[in-house]
Amino acid sequence: MVEFKEDVSIVLGGAAGQGVQTVEAILTYALKKSGYHVYANKEYMSRVRGGINTTEIRVSSKRVRAFVKRIDILVPFKKGTLSWVKDRLGENTVVLGEKENVEEEFLDKINLVEVPLTKMAMEVGSQLYLNTTAAGLIVGLFHGDFEAVEEYISKRFGSKGENVVKKNIEAAKKGYELGVKLCDEGTIRVEVERDEKVKDEVLLTGTEAVGIGAFAGGMNFLSFYPMSPSTGVSTFAAQHAEEFGIIVEQVEDEIAAVNMALGAWFAGARAMVSTSGGGFALMSEAISLAGMAENPVVVHLAQRPGPATGLPTRTMQGDLNLVLYAGHGDFPRIILAPGSLEEAFYLTAEAFNLADKYQVPVIILTDQYFVDTYYNLPAPDVEKVKFERHIVEAKPGYRRYELTEDGISPRAVPGYGEDVVIANGNEHDEWGDITEDAELTIKMQEKRAIRKLETIKKDAPLPKLIGSEKAKYLVIAWGSTLHVVEEALEKLGREDVALLHFSWVYPLNPETRKFFEGKVLIDVENNITGQFAELLRKEFGIEVHHKILKYDGRPFSVEEVLEGLKGVIE
Amino acid sequence: MVEFKEDVSIVLGGAAGQGVQTVEAILTYALKKSGYHVYANKEYMSRVRGGINTTEIRVSSKRVRAFVKRIDILVPFKKGTLSWVKDRLGENTVVLGEKENVEEEFLDKINLVEVPLTKMAMEVGSQLYLNTTAAGLIVGLFHGDFEAVEEYISKRFGSKGENVVKKNIEAAKKGYELGVKLCDEGTIRVEVERDEKVKDEVLLTGTEAVGIGAFAGGMNFLSFYPMSPSTGVSTFAAQHAEEFGIIVEQVEDEIAAVNMALGAWFAGARAMVSTSGGGFALMSEAISLAGMAENPVVVHLAQRPGPATGLPTRTMQGDLNLVLYAGHGDFPRIILAPGSLEEAFYLTAEAFNLADKYQVPVIILTDQYFVDTYYNLPAPDVEKVKFERHIVEAKPGYRRYELTEDGISPRAVPGYGEDVVIANGNEHDEWGDITEDAELTIKMQEKRAIRKLETIKKDAPLPKLIGSEKAKYLVIAWGSTLHVVEEALEKLGREDVALLHFSWVYPLNPETRKFFEGKVLIDVENNITGQFAELLRKEFGIEVHHKILKYDGRPFSVEEVLEGLKGVIE
Amino acid sequence: MNVQLPTGRELFEPKRPGSEDVAWCPGCGNFGIRNILISTLAELGLRPNQVAIISGIGQAAKMPHYINANGYHTLHGRAIPIATGVKASNPELTVIAEGGDGDMYAEGGNHLLHAIRRNPDITVLIHDNQVYGLTKGQASPTTMKGMKTPTQPWGVFEEPLNPVALGVALDASFVARTFMGYFKESVEIIKKAIQHKGLAIVDILHPCVSFNKVNTYAWYREHTYWMDDHDPYDREAAFRRALESDPLPLGIFYIHEKPTFEEQVPAYKKDKTPLWKRGPKPELVKRFFEGKKL
Amino acid sequence: MNVQLPTGRELFEPKRPGSEDVAWCPGCGNFGIRNILISTLAELGLRPNQVAIISGIGQAAKMPHYINANGYHTLHGRAIPIATGVKASNPELTVIAEGGDGDMYAEGGNHLLHAIRRNPDITVLIHDNQVYGLTKGQASPTTMKGMKTPTQPWGVFEEPLNPVALGVALDASFVARTFMGYFKESVEIIKKAIQHKGLAIVDILHPCVSFNKVNTYAWYREHTYWMDDHDPYDREAAFRRALESDPLPLGIFYIHEKPTFEEQVPAYKKDKTPLWKRGPKPELVKRFFEGKKL
Ligand SMILES: Cc1ncc(C[n+]2csc(CCOP(=O)(O)OP(=O)(O)O)c2C)c(N)n1
Ligand SMILES: Cc1ncc(C[n+]2csc(CCOP(=O)(O)OP(=O)(O)O)c2C)c(N)n1
Ligand code: SF4
Ligand code: SF4
Ligand SMILES: [Mg+2]
Ligand SMILES: [Mg+2]
């Protein structure tokens, strides 16, 4: 008998097209509805069919938000799955499934609980039901609410007709019953407690958190060119475009996307573009125009490993330098990198106020790991999102680039007010007309690159300290690694280790410096050079003492961070 | 009587289209040929006619290579010139020209030597001859060789017919005679010695030095999209394309330009693109491809002030951050920024060997000031340029991305050898095929972003120290400011101040650190944030103590640097 | 306050500091185009704050500084997507995308292609001087074969781009060509282009007196003619005319009325308010979260 | 060494580690195109090291991994300029630029326009499945109106791009369309395209079984026909055919023989040596400096 308590990590693996992602969706839905805390994340190949994709689902008695390497239960849909995840198999791993899907070499090394999934699916009518059968099986192991499974299947397959729904429910039921039986027989014992509060929480992905955050922030225009892993946000916006009454337009290339968004902001809309590193690289010139013309714009950049096409469906925090320096010449920008889904919601909403207020590009940096992460959380408080409009009327004599002390000129939009608005990507005078004057150039350069930047810095929120102010060791992380590092620190259980997490990445408030004093600094980043540590060196002259870096295109696991920390902490 | 000794700074100013640049060309040619050391530089507006453009010509007994603010003799072709250069007028400035071209308010403040240039031109036949008359006048002041003027005019206007040549020579002669007369009468006294060696030297612009350097380095393909101030290099290449038998192609946009060059290198050519900041920003994605596919490429980037269109015809060192970080993901690159015309020649030539050897993007950073600078120099030694070819044969089993210790894989080109060559912008295995493997990803990331970078760093030459190793103050400069800082230091005349000049800007050899130890560091940069000082902070954790920055779109003058230094040195 | 506002053409004369200093060369065709455009806007009875001129980079693209209207002098080649964003965000504005032949056909070529497909209700004015003016005389996509330039000293060998044929082939909503030397006719054509619902492309031939020594005022007069008997609703005829190269036909080649981009996006299906007047919809966000609870 | 080298089709089958794992979906039209291409190359008697396949990014663009030939899997939309650079640097190579409809007509649209003008002697193969495959089903520039996709849930309203009409309008040197379901005919067309001196565009229709539920194998068979009586040298006729949309004509629409880019650049005027075999010319550099002494 194998027993799993409190926190179970289930991994399903199969070829693209075998429906692993459907299982993920059914499980998170049904288990959450049953009152379990759930977390899910997937990794997949850059292809539409074949290869091997896997999904990890954690089911837990407590809140759970991070990726673990450990696999408690593995369900292989295809031979090859075990080899693909072999580093993650442990002594206690149970493989649930068919012998045919297990490679010879593993047979004598693993706990195989044979389950004739294919046969069961065929009994319902076709191999196509393999995935719903498996989903039912897992829900059964948890004695979850089967109605939730039924509900989900009805919603998801409803458009395909009654028979499809019926057959899928039948398959799930078969799986469910077997799951329950395996427990009852004592083959597998799963002990995870339900938490009634969970039922009233929401289940979101990173993609949805960014997307709905944008809606909350008043986004009414999204132009994009598809690019993994950023496309989800555009798809989300498109799916809700009619409901929210907004424009979502797929354009010819990323250059059009960002320039269209600039035009939209110029005319007073709240526009966003969603892209990945290569697409953003193409936008560099326009980002510089945004800097010069003081044209607000919001960009969501979901990172994937580069350079170039790299690993299109995998994860990395490798584009920080790109967004810090993209565009020619000196001008300010704001970079945000949410660590939690709550932050993704609030920060994305706030990005629109920031862009409107400071009239700079605001970049929201996520990554494939982040956008593909699911978990349950209390519904964000929509009332907390404030809508701040910074548009003025163009009264006669209006000057678009009026020189002000804080570097921010009142922004009017065409058609509002009697006078006209002239924006310009050439160096300009206060009215927006071209200048070649040396004095004026100095004033305008200082307005943008110094005074406005200082204003933003002063307003910038400080990073979040998790743990004691007195800790000897300070772990530094930014963006999507938040929860993984948090859980690793919990596991480490040492009071002298704290976490400083940055979701406001740039520009840094000068007061941030105080956090570093006298600490042993440990930088955790999902890239090869430690780009954020370099930024800290540049901004504050501080040296991190240790770097824990990962750059194989996969996210950090709790175990890896823990191991890394143990390696550098006495 | 006004007297100028040793080193005279002459400034001509007029509307675009009035021929100031022709005067510049005649003067540098004729005065150099007469045995004077000459230097010239122009500043001009982003328009084809009208406005005010000026040229500074320094004529000296000694080698002269830097811009001074001081104007000894000013020749205004148009009213408004004096206001435009008013900060540069001193007590001794002589204005040579017509009263009508001097604004009222200056009349009682300046030494005006009235010269009826327009009248003289009209006597020859047309106002069109104003510029040649003025050129003759200046040469006359120096008692220069009039045959040199004749020679130049014959060459330059030859294609326009005999009469044009004759008339222009006549005009120049009139000017010349008046110039000689002004001296003989004692109105103006100019005492500059001739140096026979000068006659055997060459007279080059920055544009030409880069262009001919590229030819010397074996460039045989140049693709470009016009953009000031980089277009000169492309024009130079086009003008010599037939002679050198190379391809020069103006393309539809900068993205095409750089990608075409990548294709050319892939097939074994030595290709370059020439652009400015905005164009380079558009190339960012392709630069990342070069990093990933290990596709060599050489880019000449002539900087102008940004952001965006900025000041299209002016100067700044504002695109260092852009080239340091352009492109998504981590990969190495080499950045060169010549300080002298000699360096422009040798470094540009060498850029092709470097690209070929390390298979990375090599970026040559100049700026408007640099490309538009003229002076005489001993002809560079063409024999010193070595042609290093790093292409191997694709023998059966060839692997384009073979894992090697130094991070450099032997590069074959299609058609040479029996096997095929597969290059790839996706993460790849040794053969160049797509991989999704974690281990291989780590190996390839490390190959590029660590091992290859280390190899280049080790090979990187050190910066040039000018002055004593024991100096207390160390001035740091890079690229085009070399001569201006050099002359300022000469003028300062203090043994405890030395200059460290970087023309190999990135990656920096780790040994560079030793230069900074125990010094008071003074950073001189033609941009608003001190981008190079930031790089030093990032690379070596060092803080410069003082920054002398200029960002009005104009180059530093010797006086400004001198003043800046005096301000920070005890 | 009862200030007397100017009317007609005077309205569109800019009076900002330095407005009198126009950076074009004396004699340049751009002056004529400015003149034509001001008359057109005045005749249409528009006010400056109702018009937005979005320009790229080049001599042509300096227009926003020489006309009193909302303006955005953007990036080389990007006027069309920016103008599309402007119009989509505020359909009440009359939006003009303006630039040179290099701007619109080289750097911006892809945007032109796809704007035709998207059909926003904007007017695209191309100042076609068959050369790069601002950067001093290089060939443009419409430079005639054989012309020698500083960067094509051997003479241009690329096929010139035929923007009219391109527009017809891609089924653009409105395609016209004019020569700025014909003032009245040009005003009429541009007026129709602005009034046309959908993307209207007007290729405006004009001499560059500084760099194009081939296509002069005289040349254009000699090598163009007005299509008097042409039916712009006949696509094949339009294509045949588009292929004529000497003399070049002038006039409206092709019209195909069809729904515009703004008419088809969800944003304006139920609500015509321009986007900038709208706020977020917190109720819908809350409803979304409710849906995510189950 | 006297190794027996394979011949014909076998030559072009890659045998590198992992070559057997093709990432396309079972039943995808891309397999057919690969098959057609291998046969074409074999029938032309070429050897793998004489061919260079430059691809963009997309499902189509994975081709270099599935054919044994020189290959460069580049960036989305950039196959054409890179291929142009390759051909110009080594005219001895047979150069193919390959990619999907998104690759070539959206992201790469501008390059296609101007490659037509430049006329390098390369073959452009567009795998036209009227959808974005790799990124999972969004509309492409050739998607038919009304098709619903994840990002156009309201149904595509943009005018589909007509690549054939575009090619004819811009006077492309060779323009053809085929459907990969017709093996023999496709081989013939691509063979002619490769043999054609100058830019040859072949739009290859093919079903995407995963994301395009409209344009299936059956659909293409029903909605296409072969032009039997068409004269590809007649531009107006070509344009008329290009405008036909149901059924779509297949075959060679247009041929205009003219000098290629490589034939016109100075590099090969006197010397045919590919660039990679050349070194610098120090004598000329020295002569330049001599000239600068006076
Ligand atoms: C990205 C970029 N590339 C190049 C330039 C340089 N540039 C400015 S205007 C211009 C072309 C001008 O030609 P055209 O568009 O025909 O306008 P014209 O000056 O002839 O009116 C170029 C290449 C630029 N500003 N930005
Ligand atoms: C600059 C850039 N933008 C977007 C992408 C994402 N992307 C990859 S393939 C593709 C489109 C695929 O469609 P198509 O070219 O028609 O090829 P198919 O997969 O249908 O063969 C896109 C948008 C990218 N790789 N690079
Ligand atoms: S350069 Fe040509 S287009 Fe530009 S303003 Fe002068 S004449 Fe006109
Ligand atoms: S997604 Fe479509 S085009 Fe791509 S391989 Fe699958 S079926 Fe073919
Ligand atoms: Mg032009
Ligand atoms: Mg496709």
Image (tube, coloured by chain):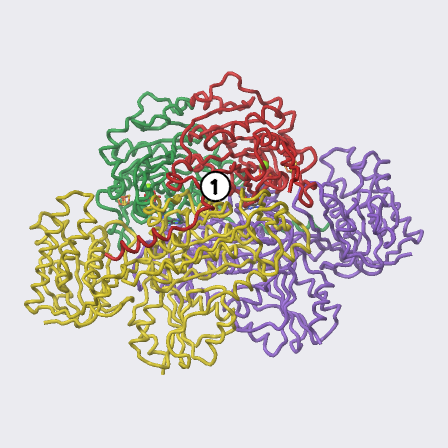
Chain colours: A purple, B yellow, C green, D red
Q: Residue furthest left?
A: B185
- From the top left corner, tell me how far across and down residue A195 is, in percent: 79, 58
Quarter placement of the N terminus of chain B: bottom left
Quarter placement of the C terminus of chain B: bottom left
Q: Residue furthest bottom?
A: B570
Looking at the picture, does residue B406 appear above or below residue A568? above
Q: Chain of mark 1?
A: D
Q: Residue furthest front?
A: D1
Give, as a three-letter code, the residue at label 1: Asn
Q: Is residue B461 left or right of residue C294?
A: left
Q: Quadrant of residue A520?
A: bottom right
Residue at position x 44%, y 64% from top? Answer: B504
Q: Is residue C126 left or right of residue D207?
A: left
Residue at position x 46%, y 38% from top? Answer: C115
Kindly state the secondary structure of the residue where label 1 is placed. loop
Q: Quadrant of ligand 6?
A: top right
Q: Which residue is mark 1?
A: D90
Residue A522 seen in the current view:
yes
Looking at the picture, does residue B409 appear above or below residue C55? below
Q: Is residue D151 left or right of residue A435?
A: right
For label 1, count other residues whose C-alpha is less than 10 Å away and answer few (under 14), some (14-19) or many (20+): many
Q: Nearer the viewer, residue B340 or D114?
A: B340
Q: Nearer the viewer, residue A301 or B14?
A: B14
Q: Residue furthest right?
A: A185
Residue at position x 20%, y 60% from top? Answer: B33
Looking at the picture, does residue A515 appear above or below residue A290? below
Residue at position x 71%, y 55% from top? Answer: A375
